[in-house]
Amino acid sequence: MKKLYSSEVKSELEKTVLNNQPFTKDDIVSLPAPVQRYFRYCGYIGKKKMSNAKIVFEDVDFISNGKQLKLRSEQYNFVSEPARIAYLSSKVMGIIPFEGRDKYQNGKGSMIGKLMKIITLFDVTGPKMDQSALVTFLAEALIVPNVALQDYIKWEEIDSNKAKAIMNYGGIKVEGIFSFNDKGEFIKFETNDRYMDKGNGLIEKERWTAKVENYIEKNGIRVPGRMKGIWNLSKNDLVYFDGNITEINFDNSNV
């Protein structure tokens, strides 16, 4: 699984053309007011536009099919041709190796999970996975903010602290609402366009929220330090991903 992940990331890195142009005030003037405020608050104006990002989560509390794991997640997000490739690793009961690979690449989504490198726990592909993977990429657009300026995303202002983003790519359209606090921090993304795998072949749409917390300053830029993935189910909210972001590096050239 790690070799598969590395080869997929490498293929995207080989296509990447680094952008040496900085973010300017003119770049964000057409964005909704709360999105502009986010760019200014985080310190991106004058900083170089990134072509990709490596994001690492440690100590992730993860729930899958009712089972809870503590895992590490490493991912790469790419801007010009949208792609998101993530590798998850853990040990079930502290001894049994678990690996997962979750990706959106070349307009397609897929998710694979294995125990001991040979036992396949899940292998999900198809149109519902394509859409879910695309909307996950959209949810992270402001963590890799050059994504927000791309032609495949259109923005609509809702009010002083909310904006809608609509993404069209590969024949799929998804959308969601970004929420911000008064300081300018992006704090939440909500969508109805993601499918939940409920087991036994049942995959249904459920409302989904990504929450962002604990902003820290790194290299003159404010970045989030924690992220949660939440299914907003009819009876209760299920926080199935809750991890600390320990690394965000832009413009990577190697896996």
Image: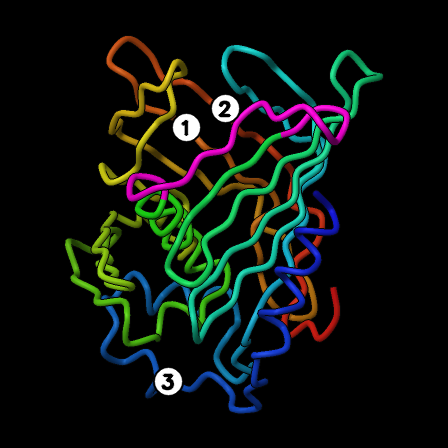
- Please say if the residues under marks 1 and 2 sit with CB atoms less than 8 Å apart: yes
Dot 3 or dot 2, earlier in sequence: 3
Dot 1 or dot 2, earlier in sequence: 1
In the image, residue 216 above or below residue 25: above
Three-letter residue code for mark 1 = Ile
Q: Quarter holding the C terminus? A: bottom right
What is the crowding at mark 1: few (fewer than 14 residues within 10 Å), some, or many (at least 20)? some
Q: Is residue 28 magenta?
A: no
User: Based on the displayed image, in which of its 4 quarters is residue 93 positioned?
Assistant: top right
Give the tally of numbered discs. 3
Three-letter residue code for mark 3 = Lys
What stretch of residues is rendered in magenta? 114-129
Q: Position of residue 48 (x, y in %)?
A: 56, 83
x 59%, y 85%: residue: 18
Q: CA distance from mark 3 to mark 2?
A: 37 Å
Any mark on residue 182, and which? none
Question: What is the residue that sits farthest to the bottom in this orientation?
Answer: 21
Q: In the image, which is nearer the foreground, mark 3 or mark 2?
A: 2
Pick whichever, 83 or 26, lies toward us.
83
Q: Quarter holding the N terminus? A: top right
Q: Label 2: which residue?
A: 240
Q: CA distance from mark 3 to mark 1?
A: 34 Å
What is the crowding at mark 3: few (fewer than 14 residues within 10 Å), some, or many (at least 20)? some
Q: Label 1: which residue?
A: 230
In the image, residue 11 above or below residue 248: below
Q: Position of residue 201 (x, y in %)?
A: 36, 19
Three-letter residue code for mark 2 = Tyr
Q: Label 3: which residue?
A: 25
